[in-house]
Amino acid sequence: MTLKIRCSNFNFECGTDEAGRGCLAGPVTAAAVILSSDFSNNILNDSKQLSEKKRMLLKPIIEEQSLSFGVQHIFEDEIDTINILNASIKAMHGSISQLSIVPNYIIVDGNKFKPYKSIPHQTIIKGDGKYLSIAAASILAKTYRDLYMEKIHEEFPMYNWKKNKGYPTKEHRAAIEKYGITRYHRKSFRLLTEQYRLDL
């Protein structure tokens, strides 16, 4: 499926997406991207469809060729305070606020968003597989978050965040059971399953 460049007739349409909503540790990270009407790239797609190598290859291309981009982390303590949905939307708002061009239309991956200022917006389910600007935002959100998780992996290598990026893998949950939690873990999340609570 070929991704479309525009959803609206506005010149400065911004796509936004987040990464890390389902993780047990680390921030939720969002990006916002405005692309020119003549932007094209044969590799760019939903970040989940691409290898890590391709995502890292695309990161500087998006940064250099976009009209503007912004990236925002919302960290664990705030996620625990305002909940993950509100934190995801706050991250998207934060990334949009960093744009050097004020967008006149916003397209959002998923079906949940709150109005940003008075700019019209549209939520699009699986938008990262339909529109280039959302796909580009998904790449930046994912790569910036992955790089952050690799950095804090050095501090707590036993959880192997370098590999699992904070997602609830069996290995990650087993490490939480063995070592307890860190300041990077989301305390409002269910960090252990029944599997690890049973006294076998």
Image (spheres, rainbow, N blue to C red):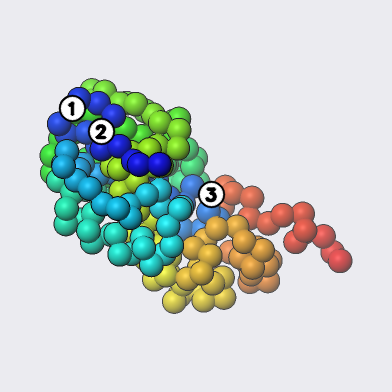
Query: How many badges with numbers are in the image?
Result: 3
- Identify the image quadrant of the N terminus: top left
Q: How far, Cα to Cα, is label 3 from label 2?
A: 29 Å
Q: What label does residue 47 carry, if any?
A: none
Q: How far, Cα to Cα, is label 2 from label 1?
A: 8 Å
Q: In this view, does 8 lie to the left or right of 187?
A: left
Would you name the residue on which mark 3 appears?
A: 22
Residue 165 seen: yes
Mark 3 or mark 1: name the one nearer the start of the chain: 1
**Mark 2: few/some/many CA within 10 Å (<14, 14-19, 20+):** many
Instruction: Please state which amino acid type lies under the numbered disc 3.
Output: Gly
Residue 63 position within the rendered picture, expressed as x and y whole percent measured from the top left: 21, 56
Q: Nearer the viewer, residue 75 or 130?
A: 130
- Identify the image quadrant of the C terminus: bottom right
Instruction: Name the secondary structure under disc 3.
Output: loop
- Which residue appears at 20% of the width and 25% of the height? 9
Question: Which dot, 2 or 1, sits closer to the camera?
Answer: 2
Q: Is residue 168 above or below residue 156?
A: above
Quadrant of the rendered structure where residue 7 is?
top left
Would you name the residue on which mark 2 appears?
A: 6
Instruction: Please state which amino acid type lies under the numbered disc 2.
Output: Arg
Residue 35 position within the rendered picture, expressed as x and y whole percent measured from the top left: 20, 43
Q: What label does residue 10 carry, if any?
A: 1
